[in-house]
Amino acid sequence: MSSTSMIKLDALTKTFTTDEVETTALNAIDLEIDAGEFLAVMGPSGCGKSTLLNILLGQSLSRCSEGDLTAVRKANIGFVFQNFNLIDNLSVFENVELPLFYQGMAKPKRRELVDEQLAKLGIAHRRDHFPRQLSGGQQQRTAVARAIVSSPKLILADEPTGNLDSSNGNDVMSALVQLNQAGTTIVMVTHSEHDAKFAGRVVRLADGKIAA
């Protein structure tokens, strides 16, 4: 692991205000993530895990246009969030191919890399299907394949195995580990103690603070 810091948060605080109540999602978070690190962020629902990922991304993914997401991918960031964000009118193959297309990669190389990831994640037989024709687990694996196909420098993952059985979940985690070993920095939010064991370091959040 490199000792070079990729991400540093100093006293990060995030509050959400409605007409009736103010909620502190993150409370003076200090966190440093090294380049090449695999970090798991754990904690109960509502503790601020997803808020932290959205801040690392720079914006709420749910509010991003496809143009915004393209800019993120060009910045060498891959992301896997719980709502998949697959493009409905593109096939599985085309969804996974998208980051490589925007990088200007030649078509034969794109095809090789996409086919490799689809096979690795067990969805090669669905390559020509559209998202609406997939189960939730198949959509999740498609989103993971799209995130990792270009071997980005940073991957932000929110419950990457949340819709998968244990076998397919292990395939996803193995793919993330391989990328990390090749130098990709990974920040993963998870409820799964099993998945967290794949990470090199675990940070636990509680009530918007780092508990451990």
Image: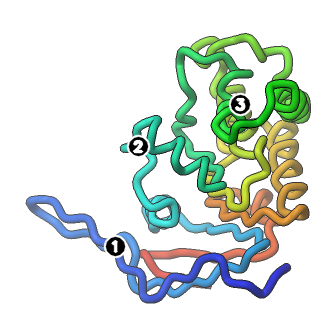
At a point 65% along the width and 50% down the height, the residue shown is 78
| Most foreground residue, 178 or 40 | 178
Q: Is residue 94 above or below residue 104?
A: above
Mark 3 or mark 1: name the one nearer the start of the chain. Answer: 1
Question: Would you say 161 lies left or right of 169 here?
Answer: left
Crowding near the residue tagged with mark 1, few <14, some 14–19, many ≥20 C-alpha atoms within 10 Å: some
Q: Is residue 172 above or below residue 121?
A: below
Residue depth check, mark 3 versus mark 1: number of the one nearer the observer: 3
Residue type, mark 1 in image = Lys
> Which residue in the structure is indicated by mark 1?
14
Q: Position of residue 95 (x, y in %)?
A: 65, 27
At a point 68% along the width and 57% down the height, the residue shown is 155
Crowding near the residue tagged with mark 3, few <14, some 14–19, many ≥20 C-alpha atoms within 10 Å: many
The residues bearing labels 3 and 2 have C-alpha atoms spaced at a distance of 18 Å
At a point 43% along the width and 75% down the height, the residue shown is 208
Q: Position of residue 121 (x, y in %)?
A: 84, 34
> Which residue in the structure is indicated by mark 3?
96
SS label for mark 1: strand
The residues bearing labels 3 and 1 have C-alpha atoms spaced at a distance of 33 Å
Residue type, mark 3 in image = Val
Tell me, for residue 64, which label it has, or none: 2
Q: Position of residue 29 (x, y in %)?
A: 47, 83
Residue type, mark 2 in image = Cys
